[in-house]
Image (tube, rainbow, N blue to C red):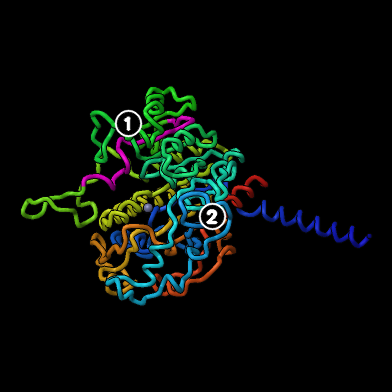
Amino acid sequence: MYFRKKISFVFSVAILFSVLAISSAQAAKNVIVMISDGAGYNSWLAASMYQGKVGKQAYDRPGWVKLSCATYPLNRKNKPTGNDEQDKAVAYDPFKAWDASRIESKPGEFAGYAYLKSTPTDSAAAATAMASGRKTYNTSINWDNRNRPMIGATIAEIAKSRSKSAGVVTSVPWSHATPSGFGGAHNVSRNNLAEIANEMLGAAWLDVIMGAGNPDFDADGRPRKKPKPSDYTYVGGKKTWELLKNDRHPAGWKLLENKEDFEKLAEGNEPPPAKLLGIPQVATTLQQKRARVTLGSGGEKRPPVEPFETPLTASVPSLAAMSKAAIRALEKNPNGFYLMIEGGAVDWANHANQPERTIEEQVDFVQAVDAVVAWIEQNGGWDDTLLILTADHECGNLWGPDSDKTPYQPLVDNGPGKMPGMKHNHAGHANSLVPLYARGADAERFKKLVKGKDEMAAAVWNISGEYVDNTAVFRVMKAAMEREAIR
Ligand SMILES: [Zn+2]
């Protein structure tokens, strides 16, 4: 009896000390996660080649945890199937992923490409895994495979329960899969966009929502004479839009549309509103969907070859400006904030096999990363903030210029300001590993969650090859927030 008491006393003291040790260690006041949607290693690399910054990006500096992330879903059905069983056929298998054997019946096809293209996640299941820690079926927005909403379980809701502010920013419509998943919406399908938009607008846990999808403008930022009913879907329908436009939405959202207003807020020249809804004057995407024609040397119209050959739409803010404006609104909270920033149109460019737009969109994303890193370093530093950079999945099966003949051919670096040699081999997603970079409070925790090593990925991209599962993103963000609460 005496010994048992003594042992339990020793245990209590040990637990107390470990709690103290955790709470006195670095804890995250702020958690920022940045998702380059549909950007596998080669999309990140292509932009770095174009910028002349291979190995010189912010995330290449000392202090960063550099791993890879596996992105596969629970299963590839488009509705709940009733159990929690992992479909083993889609779980990432490096041996299958790098199988270079030719498929004789299909010229230009290899066994590894075929595997990667037939087993990927969509953005909804990936966002759910990263935002709630649970794998689910494709098209789910924080909805489990037993047909139940994951109420209270998302990182946005957890942030709010810890008195933090929360927000999402994206370069595609803000009710799309990634911002809605990370924003803590719950829906059986990502396709119920108006429902999702209205849940987000009614969500007590969201203080900032920013993204494209403005019904009054077209993809080039020109005013629409008469928007169609479907143009209002992204913002929750025509009724919701009218309430927002007239400052009469019951949740008290303040709508921002002008580029100058985003920039004023970003520079700290305007006091931010309590509930900030930023929808730039453009439909669908900030830039990727703008007209894709330029004039050839003989004056003929042709698709652009080089990034930025077609001028950017001048009336639309950059992702960096929107991110800074969002942070200005969130940083007022002394308990800190949670923010997801998405380069959403890297995916759209990869789906459309537009090499120059893949680079433009990834450059826009990396410039937002630079802006966020600069803010962190000027505002409490890395002890206060956890920053995670990753992708939700690969898209386009992007490889070198002859990768339809030579499987997994590396990209060709043609120098700064020059289009790298690259080729899309698919119009959809691929189940490849994606990069994961993290720095700041609790970032080291990712190293404890490594679940495998991909030797081929290590050799091809000159990385460690160690990978975590995408649910690790939730686990590390949650751990970071809870330690702050203990302190
Ligand atoms: Zn996609």
Spot occupied by residue 54 in the image (x, y as percentages of width and height): 35, 64
Camera-nearest residue between 177 and 412? 177
Q: Residue furthest left?
A: 298
Residue 379 as seen in the image, left or right of residue 418: right
Camera-nearest residue between 229 and 146? 146
Mark 1 near ligand 1 (CB under 8 Å)? no
Dot 2 amino acid type:
Lys
Mark positioned earlier in the residue sequence (2 or 1): 2
| Residue extent of the magenta highlight | 271-291
Asked where in the image residue 110 lies, by quadrant, the reply is bottom left
| Residue that badge 2 annotates | 135
Spot occupied by residue 418 in the image (x, y as percentages of width and height): 23, 62
332 vs 38: above or below: above
What secondary structure do most residues of the magenta stretch adopt? loop
Label 1 neighbour load within 10 Å: few <14, some 14-19, many 20+: few
Spot occupied by residue 38 in the image (x, y as percentages of width and height): 38, 55
Camera-nearest residue between 206 and 47? 206
Which numbered dot is residue 401? none
Judge whether residue 381 can be spotted in this image.
no
Which numbered dot is residue 229? 1
Label 2 neighbour load within 10 Å: few <14, some 14-19, many 20+: many
Mark 2 near ligand 1 (CB under 8 Å)? no
Does the magenta-highlighted stretch encompass residue 414?
no
Residue at point 28%, 31% (across, down): 227
Residue at point 43%, 28% (across, down): 254
